[in-house]
Image (spheres, rainbow, N blue to C red):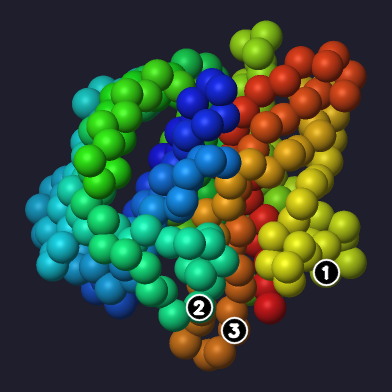
Amino acid sequence: MFDFASLDGQLGGYVRLELLPNQDTCWYWAWVVGPDRPPVVVLDQEVPLPRGAGLELRTTGLWADHIVEEPFEHVSVGAEAFALLLDDPAEALGPLVGMPTPFGLDLGWETAGARTSTAGTTEGYGLPCHVVGEVLVADERIELDGIGHRWHTWGVEDWWSAGWRSVAGRLDDGTWFADRTEVGADDRALEPHDATFPTSDRARLEEQGLDLVIEPLAFAPVPVANDDGRACRLVRALCRYRDALSEHCGVGWTEWNQPL
């Protein structure tokens, strides 16, 4: 997964490529959001697996590639697709209907800090990154010089047994942070707004000495269903963060996994 955010919090997005070799398919999700712009989404959960040695995808209405230019240092991501322009991000949780919109990415993730390990049922790592390039939506060509994280995980993710909250971003003093914590159904982080989205949250990162107040700015959710009927809402949000201990602020992404 690759996420990005402008330093002013006005633009953010992410790409998630989930390979399912036992089903001979993969999921491709891409979002571009901002507090003052309608959300744009590519959500295809029936993409054929890449056939070559790389991670290039080609299917009807979608081309995407994910190239490791230098291991652990630089990855470039490109995409050309017809996305859907939505009136409300919550529309992505039901039958997906929107206005077809040209969409593209030409972005590079350059490692800017130390690797962190992932939590949950998978193994892997995350890397804080400086993200530079272009985002294309309809006739807009948006230059990005911001921050983000990229994640590489492997194994079987259990989306349905437990909820979690993850945070990843950077404060204005240069402090990078990333953390994932399991949360229960009675945790206030899952308290819904319009039956869907958290309105605020707080994350205490003891090892990093941070007490983060989380302000969601724009949402980018995805429903995830299993063949046996289990389902969850993966609610991701471009967020502004404030450390209550130092008063430093920053931007990044928060993810709430909400089993149904």
Q: To which quarter of the image does residue 244 belong?
A: top right
Q: Amino acid at mark 2?
A: Gly
The reply, left or right, for residue 241 in relation to residue 67 is: right
**Residue 171, above or below 38:** above
Q: Nearer the viewer, residue 20 or 240?
A: 240
Secondary structure at numbered mark 1: loop
**Residue 155, above or below 12:** below
Q: Nearer the viewer, residue 231 or 240?
A: 240
| Distance from the alpha carbon under mark 1 to that under mark 3 | 16 Å
Q: Earlier in the sequence, mark 2 or mark 3?
A: 2
| Distance from the alpha carbon under mark 2 to that under mark 3 | 15 Å
* Rendered location of residue 161, percent (x, y): 68, 73
* Rendered location of residue 87, percent (x, y): 48, 62
Q: Residue furthest top?
A: 173
The reply, left or right, for residue 122 in relation to residue 101 is: right
Q: Residue at x 72, y 30 (%)?
A: 241
Residue 238 is at least partly visible in this image: yes
Residue at image mark 3: 230
Q: Amino acid at mark 3?
A: Arg
Secondary structure at numbered mark 2: loop
* Rendered location of residue 105, percent (x, y): 26, 39
Residue at image mark 1: 185
Q: Residues within 10 Å of mark 1 (few under 14, many from 20)?
A: some
Q: Earlier in the sequence, mark 1 or mark 3?
A: 1
Q: To which quarter of the image does residue 97 belong?
A: bottom left
Numbered label attached to residue 94: 2
**Residue 257, above or below 65:** below
